[in-house]
Image (cartoon, coloured by chain):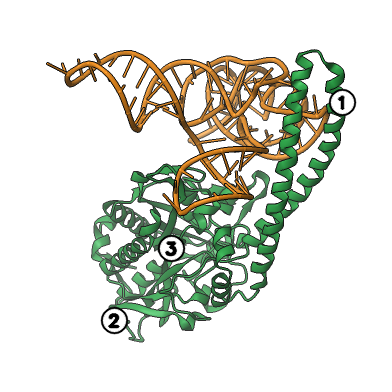
Chain colours: A green, B orange
Amino acid sequence: MLDVTFIRENPEEVKQAMRNKGEDNVEVVNELLNVDEQWRSMVEETDKLRSESNTKAKKIGQLMGQGKKEEAQDIIDYTSKLKEDIQEKEDRLRSLKKAREELLLQIPNVPHKSVPVGKTEDDNEVFKTWGEPNEEDWRKPHWELVEEQGLLDFERGAKVTGAGFPFYVGAMAKLQRALINYFLNKASEEGYTEIQVPYFVNEDSARGTGQIPDKEDMMYEVPRDDFFLIPTAEVPVTNFHRDEILDSDELPIYYTAYTPCWRREAGSYGKDVRGLNRLHQFDKVELVKIVHPDMAYDELESLREYAESLLEELNIPYRTLLMCTGDMGFTQTKKYDLEVWSPGQQRWLEVSSCSNFGSFQARRMMLRRRKENGDTEIVHTLNGSGLALPRVVAAILEINQQQDGSIKVPEVLQPFMGTDVIKP
RNA sequence: GGAGAGGUGGCUGAGUGGUCGAAAGCGCUCCCCUGCUAAGGGAGUAUACCCCUUAACGGGGUAUCGAGGGUUCGAAUCCCUCCCUCUCCGCCA
């Protein structure tokens, strides 16, 4: 959610930002400003009437105390009518407020000036590449490799739950656990506080990070108890401090959390969803930063560099994309995607996305800091995956497979796995 | 799941229809005093929004006493729904 004052003062900049993000309905900005104008004058009118009503009510109280019942009754007759006026105005105020809110929620965040303007993923900028994408054609895609060995069981997953809910068996389960431990340990060393979070969240939290109203179709629901299964740890972690005012010296705050993530992924199909490429449930270690507004872009760079360092230590070739305006998403001001090379599939797979949300999320959840002069100020939030497991696993399997079908375990994971090779 | 108690400002805690945005204490900030220290005195100390004003300060108003609705001229106080916490019972990893 953008600051209305900012929109009021920079309507053209906001409209241009919308166009750049592929949101062509820039009329909502005008509608918003119009509704906002009406809302503000209605606030003024309503407040005046309420003020009058309050004053009169106090007077009645005084008169009653003095036993002047008849005088009091005159005023009561008057304020009874006033009350109808107020209720009418309050109704209009309510609907204006709602309209204003809804319009406001339709306006995306404004991209940073360093972000390339573009429409599709083809316009993303390759920011960095690391390692050699291996193009030897003997390498199998991971699903052939491990399903043959019974390490990953999609069929039984489909039987027990449904498509996209695989079982990880034996060494594969251990590999998952090794990665989780490795990622969490690294994040702790980097200064992130590890937290464990609820896997269900309520509606307020889903709204706080922007899953509602924009992307609610991505989440599984528990309607009986009004919960959503988290699509990412970002939701509970960022909402941890919702509606709080933080001391400035607490900032920056870094959190890391491991969670499963559940996504409905409605409409996905084809080669994109083979094997571990796209699942309904997957594991991820998430990184969240809550920072001073002036530091947000520096923090984004260090977040990106940290996520990249994980791939380098795992010895997985990757590239970092600076996402263009059209491909970066509604809530971000700037976003990097990290993609690993899948030699078995001969394609890049996204394993992390590091985003700066500016004040967009924090405003929605009223997450503020106390400034030196005592004022409050909306803080800035960032997050990134560090990392999402399935595609990292896919890359590890494909890159480290040997001609005999065995898989070498990356050195940094060996202490967690207790072995240097996965054999059939 | 059953029965009961309760949710008030940074904290403790008073307040059962009128002058209560809310006593008191603690904490915190600033000032004064005290030749250190200890103690003492005074002032201030919630959040959001609207309006006026400003370079900055400031002033006025509205809303908020778990959340949402209702009764009333007037609600922290009465009624309804929901959420949460605590105690006992039941169940259970």
Q: Amino acid at mark 2?
A: Glu
Residue under circle 3? A356
Residue under circle 2? A132
Residue neighbourhood size for the residue with mark 1, other residues' Cα within 10 Å, grouped as few (<14), some (14–19), many (≥20): few
Q: Kindly indicate whether the residue at mark 1 contacts the one at mark 3 (C-beta within 8 angstroms).
A: no
Please say whether residue A9 is visible from this viewpoint.
yes
Residue at mark 2: chain = A
Q: Kindly indicate whether the residue at mark 3 contacts the one at mark 2 (C-beta within 8 angstroms).
A: no
- Residue A79 location (% of width, % of height): 82, 32
Residue neighbourhood size for the residue with mark 2, other residues' Cα within 10 Å, grouped as few (<14), some (14–19), many (≥20): few
Residue A70's quadrant in the figure? top right
- The residue located at (41%, 68%) in the rendering is A351
Precedes in sequence: disc 1 or disc 2: 1
Q: Secondary structure at mark 1?
A: helix
Precedes in sequence: disc 2 or disc 3: 2
Q: Quadrant of the N terminus of chain A?
A: bottom right
Residue under circle 1? A74
Q: Amino acid at mark 1?
A: Asp
- A54 versus B17 height, above or below: below
Precedes in sequence: disc 3 or disc 1: 1
Residue at mark 3: chain = A
